[in-house]
Image: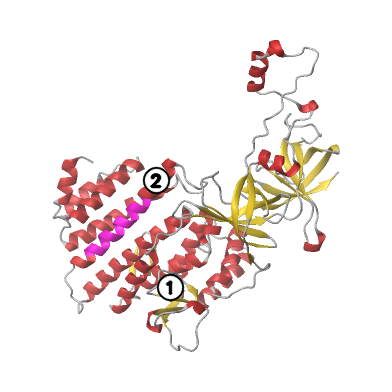
Amino acid sequence: MSNRQQTDLGQVVDLVTGMDYLSSLMLANPAVAERQLIDFLDALLASPPDPGVFFQLLEQARAPLCFVEEEMARSYHNKAVPLSLDEEQAFLMVVQAWRKMGRAYALCASLEEPATEEPNYQALMATILHRCIYYNGMVILEHYRARRELPPGVWLDLHGFFETAEEWGIAFMPVSDPLENSVQATHCAAAYVTLLLIDVASPYSNSVRNLNLIRRWASMWAPLVGIGALENDLELPPYVVELMKDLPLHPSAAIEGSAQDVRRLDTGRLGLQIDHALGQLRMRFTPSQLGLGEESSSHVARLLEHLVKPWSQSTSARRFRRFASEGIARVVTGFEAIYFHVTGEPFEQPDSALAYSRGDFEQLFTFRDRADPGQALLIRPRADFPVERWSVINHSANGFRLGRSESGQRVLHGQLMAVCPHDGERFLLAYATWLMQESAGGLIVGLATLPGIPRGIGFRPLDQVGVPTIERFAPAFILPPMPAIGEEVSLVLPPGFYHAGRELEVMDGNGHRRIRMNHVLNRQADFERISIVEL
C-alpha cells in the first residue's frame, strides 16, 4: 500500500471509503492482501473514525482477514520445529494480525459513549467483547497450531474480557458470529469456554488436523457448558479458572487467591452430548450428518473418545506412573541414522541388489586410475549420523519427557526417533506425541516408546508373483512379540508401502526371507507400524 493510501485511510470518516478499500483487497495474493489489511488496521488504530463506522469496518474486515491469515498459516502448520526463517516470519505476521484486530475492537469499545439502559448499546458491547475474546483466542490457537509456548499475559487478557462481560451483565447475551456459525447464535461466555475446552484437550499432543476439529466441536458445544462463581467454598470442583491468574482451567488444589475470582465449569451436558454423538456414530451416522466435519467415522470416534474425560472434567489414572528424572538421553532421527545406532553399523545394500547412484559413478570416474581392475567395486556409505543430547525431565514405563535448550535438528510431531535412556545402553524406537517450542527457543518433547527391542533389517516390496517391485532395499525395523502386554510382532517402515496382505522381502544377518503385512498398528508422520506374519 502506498503512503498516500495509508494517509487516506487514516482520515476515513464514512463507511463508503473504508468499504471501497476492503473491496479492492488482492485476495488472490494472500501475502499482499495481508499487508493491505495490516495497513488498514494500523490506520484505524492511529486515527479511529466514528465508533459506529469503526465497528462496521471491523466487521466487514473479519471475513477477508480470516481467509488471508488461514492461507498464510498453511506455510507453517504441520511443520517441524524450530520453524525455518520464512515459516517463523509467517507465524509472527499471523499473530500480529490477530493481535491488531483484538486491539482495534477494544479501542472501538472505549470510544463508544456509555448508554447502559439502551438494549442496542448492550447488544453492541456484547458483540465487541465477543470479538475481543475471539481474537485473543486466535492468538492462543495460533500458538498451539505452531507448537509454540504461549506468551505471558495471554490468559489474563482473556479472563479480563470475560470478567468485563460478566460485570456488565452481557456474558450470555446472544451474539451473531457468521465466521463460526451462520445459523446458531453464540455469546461471550461460549467464546471464552471454547478456548478453555481447547486447552484441556492437550493441544500440543494433537495434529493441526485434530486441533481444527477440536476447535470446531468446542465452539459448537460451548453453549452447553455452564460457567459461574463458586456456590460453596468448601466444595471445590476438580478444575477451576482463576481470573487473576495467567492460567487456563487448572486443578482446584492450586487455588491461592480470593474465591470471588474463581469460576467453575459445569460440563455435564457436554459429556452427554459427546456420548450421544458416539452413539450415533456407532449407528452408522456419518460425521457430516452430525455436523462433526468431513472426516472418517473412525477418526472422529477416536478423537471424541479422547475428549470424553478432559471435557467432562473427570480424571483418569495414568497407565504408567511418571517419575521425575535427571540425566541425559541420546536421540537420533531418520531411518538410516536410527538403523546405524540400533545395529552399530551403517545400512548397506546386499551385492545382489547393489545399485550405484550418480554420485557413486562420478566418484568412480574421477578416481578410476586408483581403482584395482581385479577388485570388486565397493562404495560404503558414510556413517556420519550425529547423536543429540537431551535432558530427561521425567519418564515412565512407556515414554519420556525430554528437553533441549541448544539448537539442533528440527523435530516433527509424530516423528520416529531412537532414544537411548539416561540409565540404559541400547536405543529404543519412540515417536513424538507432545511437542512444544519454548519462548526462549528450546524444545520440549514427549516420547512414546514402541514396545520391544528393535532389530534392524532391509526390506523391499514384492509383486503378486513374488518379484521385487524395486531393486534397492530400504532400512526398517522389526519389533518382537510381547504377549504379556498384547503386542504382536511388527514391522516399522517408512509410510507409503503398506497394503493389506502385501509381501515383502527382508534381509538381515540371517539372510533373506519373506513376510506378509497384516494391519496397521500405528501410523504417524514419517513411519507406519504394521503387524506381520513370517512366511
Tag 1 or tag 2, which sits nearer the N-term? Answer: 2
Q: Residue furthest top?
A: 369
Q: Does residue 264 appear to the left or right of 174 in the view shown?
A: right
Task: Find numbered disc 2 in the image and state the secondary structure of the residue it sits on.
Answer: helix
Cα–Cα span, label 2 and label 1: 33 Å
Question: How are the colours assigned in the image?
Answer: secondary structure
Q: Residue 430 location, x and y as percent?
A: 66, 52
Q: Residue 131 location, x and y as percent?
A: 32, 64
- Name the residue that disc number 1 marks: 223
140 or 341, nearer to the observer: 341
Task: Give yes or no for contact between labels 2 and 1 (Cβ–Cβ under 8 Å).
Answer: no
Q: Is residue 187 visible?
A: no
* Residue visible at 76% across and 37% down in the picture: 458
Quadrant in the rendering for residue 104: bottom left
Task: Find numbered disc 1 in the image and state the secondary structure of the residue it sits on.
Answer: helix
* Residue visible at 52% across and 53% down in the picture: 443
- Name the residue that disc number 2 marks: 90
Is 248 colored magenta in this rendering? no
Q: Does residue 91 appear to the left or right of 359 in the view shown?
A: left
Q: Amino acid at mark 1?
A: Pro
Q: Does residue 240 appear to the left or right of 373 in the view shown?
A: left
Q: Does residue 135 appear to the left or right of 18 in the view shown?
A: right
Q: Amino acid at mark 2?
A: Ala
495 or 242, nearer to the observer: 242
Identify the image quadrant of the C terminus. Answer: top right
Q: Residue furthest front?
A: 327
What is the chief secondary structure element of the magenta stretch?
helix
Magenta residues span 94-108
Quadrant in the rendering for residue 15: bottom left
Q: Residue 376 location, x and y as percent?
A: 79, 18
* Residue visible at 79% across and 26% down in the picture: 351
